[in-house]
Amino acid sequence: MQATLIIVFALLGTSIGSFLNVVIYRLPRRKPFWRWGERSYCPNCKKTLEPRDLVPILSFVVLRGKCRHCKKRISWQYILVESLTAALFGISVGVFGLSLELLYALVIISFAIPLVIIDARHKVIPDALSIPFIVVCLVIGELSGLAWYEPLAGAAIGAAFFWLQWFLSKGRWVGSGDIRVGAAMGALLGWKYIFAALIVSYLLGTLYSVVVLLAKKKKLGSTIAFGPFLVVGLLIVYFWGHDIVNWYFNAYWLFDKGY
């Protein structure tokens, strides 16, 4: 039964991922991504795409990653986003089962993926995405069993943490978008778990920086988009935060008893 649910929700994820690709392409370009009756089109030749060209993942494979009309390469972003959304939707069912928590997770993922891709590609986090994300995280935080003040306190802590860095560095260390993502993290996780999410995010960011420096893809002092690491840290702690915190404290006490 659970395997069937995972497959069903993974297929749903491919469809949602297809829509998220539209958001990712149009939002940074200030183009409307939700207009009734508007058809999807090739970003190169502007030809309207046929229904057979819009089947998630399968169309990309059948067309060998090229537009049917102009034969220009289609960005790997499209199949990546559709596959990633499918995988995360399937994982969500495995973690939460059929529950309200599952619905919350699917909504969070649908905001998280565009935030990650847009910031990674354009080094910007659009207000049109981040501000609704804060509101959604506040609502979910309030509905998920936290004390009424915890999402508000968490949002204040998350925003203040990045605002202070932004203020002291005059925007060199973090961007204003990171402040909004920090607020969303705290609103969703509450003040107790936001610190775990920040630790995970900084560990991931540090690991990535070391890898790209060793691979000579970046030079020392180069800037990287930090929003993706914050969002990934948020998802990891939202899905497995309780287990991570328990593991950490159990490991700490085991280590401490040896002395």
Image: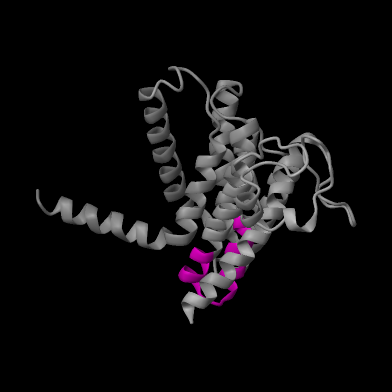
Quadrant for residue 217, please give it: top left
Judge whether 112 appears above or below 106 on screen: above
Judge whether 233 appears above or below 14 on screen: above
The secondary structure that dominates the magenta segment is: helix
Q: Which residue shows up at 41% across the image and 45% down it? A: 200
Q: Which residue shows up at 84% across the image and 42% down it? A: 47
Q: Closest to the observer: 43 or 153? A: 43
Q: Is residue 251 magenta?
A: no
Residue 154 percent coordinates (x, y): 55, 52
Residue 203 percent coordinates (x, y): 39, 39
Judge whether 65 appears above or below 124 on screen: below
Residue 245 appears in the picture as rendered: yes
Q: Which stretch appears magenta?
A: 90-109
Q: Closest to the observer: 189 or 87? A: 87
Outermost residue, bottom side: 1
Give the tally of numbered discs.
0
Q: Closest to the observer: 167 or 254? A: 254
Quadrant for residue 248, please give it: bottom left
Q: Which residue shows up at 29% across the image and 58% down it? A: 247
Residue 36 percent coordinates (x, y): 89, 57
Judge whether 10 appears above or below 85 on screen: below
